[in-house]
Image (cartoon, rainbow, N blue to C red):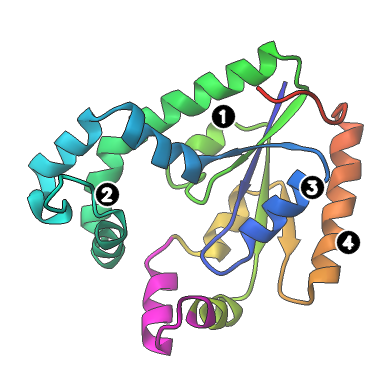
Amino acid sequence: MLKIGLTGGIGTGKSTVSKMLFVSGFKILDADLVARQVLITYPEILEKVKIEFGEGYFDWRGEFRRKEFGNFIFRFPKQRVKYEAIIMPYIKDEIEKAFKRYESNGETLVILDAPLLIETGLYKEMDYIILVWAENKNQIQRVKIRDNISNLNAISRVNSQMSIEEKKQFANIIIDNNAEVSKTESQVRDIVEFLKELGWKGDKDEV
């Protein structure tokens, strides 16, 4: 079974491309969804978070204040690295299990949608890597509008991540998502045809 990694940067439009590929019939394994699910499946993760970061990110009922914590680790990269060291082993394990389920179900190709595909080393497990790319100025403008934040805050968020230009060296396929949606759709159609040539057999039952 072929494993295709789909990644990008904040404001590049990776989620838009992921939806296009899903509509085309591909099985999409969403790493962000896995990251949310492991917090439920493995309560020890939040216990470790409480020990490492304190109880301030839990409400009076003991519920994890995910958004507030996310904003915190977004502002302080060193803290984000600490959190990723706690949660990533669980995420990687669940992703591996999901791939095995897909393969046992007869899937010929699955796409892993992962914003941190390269940073976490998951790219090493992929057969091909698709990068959704946009110019830095477009990233900043999109994040500014999407999150309703200042230009300075948008720049800070974009710059807190690995440079999209740096990610290019890891990619086999680059989607230019700077222009209108129709041009992105055209590139996605070409990728669908390429993946068919690699042996993708089309839609199958869900795992």
Q: Say which residue label 4 marks.
A: 186
Q: Say which residue label 1 marks.
A: 125
Residue 26 drawn above or below residue 68: above
Between circles 4 and 1, the one closer to the viewer is 4
What amino acid does circle 1 point to?
Answer: Glu
41 drawn magenta = no
Q: Say which residue label 3 marks.
A: 23
What amino acid does circle 4 point to?
Answer: Ser
Please say if the residues under marks 2 and 1 sit with CB atoms less than 8 Å apart.
no
Question: For the residue carrying disc 4, how many other residues have a C-alpha within 10 Å: few (<14), some (14-19), or many (20+)?
Answer: few
Q: Which residues are magenta?
A: 144-161
| Mark earlier in primary sequence (4, 3) | 3
Q: Quadrant of residue 159?
A: bottom left
Residue 94 drawn above or below residue 39: above
Q: Secondary structure at mark 2?
A: helix
Name the foreground residue: 13 vs 33. 33
Between the C-alphas of marks 1 and 3, the distance is 25 Å
The extreme top residue here reads: 104
Between circles 3 and 2, the one closer to the viewer is 3
Between circles 4 and 3, the one closer to the viewer is 3
Please say if the residues under marks 2 and 4 sit with CB atoms less than 8 Å apart.
no
Between the C-alphas of marks 4 and 3, the distance is 14 Å
What amino acid does circle 3 point to?
Answer: Val
Name the foreground residue: 50 vs 121. 50
Q: Say which residue label 2 marks.
A: 81
Question: For the residue carrying disc 1, how many other residues have a C-alpha within 10 Å: few (<14), some (14-19), or many (20+)?
Answer: few
- Image quarter where the N terminus lies is top right
What amino acid does circle 2 point to?
Answer: Val
Residue sitting at 76 percent across and 23 percent down? 205
| Mark earlier in primary sequence (3, 2) | 3
Q: Main structural element of the magenta stretch: helix, strand or loop?
A: helix
Please say if the residues under marks 4 and 1 sit with CB atoms less than 8 Å apart.
no
